[in-house]
Image: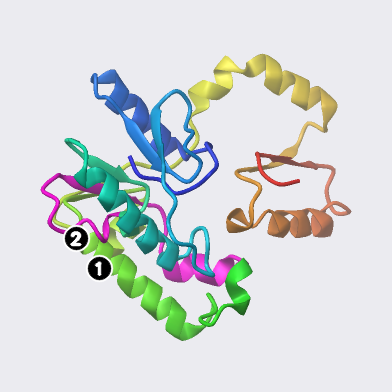
Amino acid sequence: LIREDISQVVSPCYYNLLQEFAKNGNKITVFNLSGKFGKHNCVKVSPKKFPDYPSGVFNKLSFSSECRKIIQKNDFDLVFASAPEYLHNLDGINIPKIAMVQDEWRERMFHTPWFAEFSPLPMKSKFRQMLDAKIQEKSIAKTDGIVFVNKDFAEKFSHKKSIVIPNGLDFSLMKKNSKQLKKIKKQFNEQIVLFLGRLELQKNPLLFAKIAQQLEAKTDASFLMIGEGIE
């Protein structure tokens, strides 16, 4: 499994796939930047860093090249990546390659405030958006299968072998933690507007903070943020 993020927080879609792989008796090896991912065997990958580090497309391609070196030295039956760009440089490796598509690069770059605004190719320049989107399309075409998180993406990126697994909330997990939820309800107002995600620039938590600031005088709801990252 290839995922670049240092954080061990993953989307429900990715988490559920991990559980299915393990349930069927598959041994899982995770490639990422930290070398840690729960109880799974993990390989720390150290690619060359570009200005759009860590999640820009140039870094994804660099990460893909480093993963290729490791994959060639091992005997894997399947490569699954959290983004198709991680598979872009695995040409010639005769292993089934599947990727998950969670968003469209044009949309992500338009709505996300990136550190790389001062790089030679700013994320929000039209040329950069076109370039990254093209690489995403080519990367998708190179895969043997794609997991889309919603029907809109599946219709936008046609692929001969694809499946849609909604990237939503698993409410059964909430039932298991009902006592903790009741404590949160007592601590805050009955109505809670929740931000749930990694506290890093890619997820744009400052936008949620701005929305909360604008609405706090107009509602009795409490605005709560839950996630790990830099404070």
Say the numbered circle drawn on residue 89. none
**What residue type is disc 1 on?**
Lys
Query: Is the residue 52 above or below the residue 167 in the image?
Result: below
Q: Kindly state the secondary structure of the residue where label 2 is placed.
A: helix
Left/right of residue 187 with respect to residue 87 in the rendered view: right
Query: Is the residue 48 above or below the residue 228 in the image?
Result: below
Say the numbered circle drawn on residue 138. 1
Q: Position of residue 176 (x, y in %)?
A: 56, 15
Looking at the image, which is closer to me, 130 or 120?
A: 120
Left/right of residue 215 with respect to residue 12 in the rendered view: right
> Residue at left 53%, top 44%?
6
Q: Position of residue 209 (x, y in %)?
A: 76, 54
Q: Position of residue 219 (x, y in %)?
A: 83, 48
Tag 2 residue: 142
Left/right of residue 93 with respect to residue 155 in the rendered view: left
**What residue type is disc 2 on?**
Lys
Q: CA distance from mark 1 to mark 2?
A: 6 Å
Residue 74 in view of the camera = yes
- Residues shaded magenta: 87-114
